[in-house]
Image: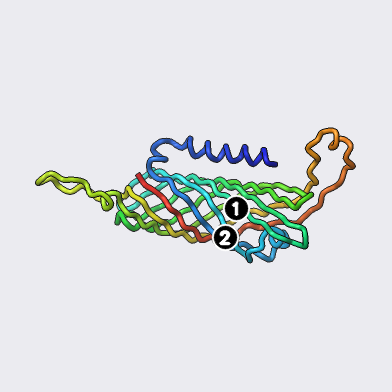
Amino acid sequence: MKATRNVLWLFCVGTLLLVPTAARAHGVGLEIGSVWTHDGESAYRAVADVGDTLPELGVGAAVTLLRREPLRLDATLAWSMTESQANVADGISTSLLEHAFTAGARLRWARFSWIQPYLSVRGGPAFVWYDAGDLESSDYALRALPAAGVDLVLPFSAIAPPALAPGQPAPQPSSAGLGVGLEVGYRFQTTYRLDADRPLPEDEDVAADAIPREGAHLGELSMSGWRFGVNLFGRF
């Protein structure tokens, strides 16, 4: 399972690096979120000790495809990760790791360079690994996330105003700069089915002599719910 995680990590980094230069140049950011999931799910109670919320961390990139004043249509690409641990009984702990890859579109109202509300929708696959000591499980799901938010941008021109020659007109306002975004949306996601298997010993001889043991069905895990996010980004 560790090798699979490493391959997935390399894939997500490579995907972001392969985004066209114009996309990377337009905008990159750090995404921090919290998801309010359905805590009534029995499987969910076995993976989180923090009430009904799960933290989320990710990175994203965007490029503007269409400009029709005062609107901007952006294409987006992102990777996110959720990790949680829980103590379900004395001496029994569980851990959950989720990776998700999403692509989508965002419609911004760019009448002003320093504040830009937007609507967005994105979707893609998500993968989960669940570890409960001598039981391990993995599965995949599909998610869609419609959202609304607002970006607050501090233009580079405000940080370091350009030097102008006498009589030279001031440049047009630019959206290039550093900013923070606030976003609220709902994450629709198919459920994970946690059919746990007992991991084989790493030693091949020991694994060959081990008595076969069946795993267990741990239930279905819903990761749908409201999401609140904070994005720290740069636009160029």
Indicate the amino acid at tag 1.
Thr
Q: Which residue is mark 1?
A: 82
Q: Are marks 2 and 1 in contact (CB under 8 Å)?
A: yes
Q: The residue tagged with tag 1: helix, strand or loop?
A: strand
Q: Is 51 left or right of 233, judged from the image as shown? A: right
Task: Give 25 or 64, whichever is nearer the viewer.
Answer: 25
Q: Nearer the viewer, mark 2 or mark 1?
A: 1
Earlier in the chain: of badge 2 and badge 1, it is 2
Instruction: For mark 2, give the secondary structure.
Output: strand
* Extreme residue toward the top, this view: 205
Report which residue position mark 2 lands on: 35
Q: Say few, some or many: other residues with alpha carbon within 10 Å of mark 1 (under 14 / 14 to 19 / 20 or more).
A: some
Location of residue 134 in the rendering, given as x and y in whole percent from the top left corner: 79, 49
What's under tag 2, amino acid-wise?
Answer: Val
- On the image, the x and y values in percent for residue 184 come to 49, 61
Q: Residue 59: where, in percent of width, then height?
A: 49, 47
Residue plotted at (43% across, 51% down): 106
Q: Residue at x 61, y 58 (%)?
A: 224
Rendered location of residue 45, percent (x, y)? 70, 62
Quarter of the image with the N terminus is top right
Name the residue at 40% across, 43% down. 63
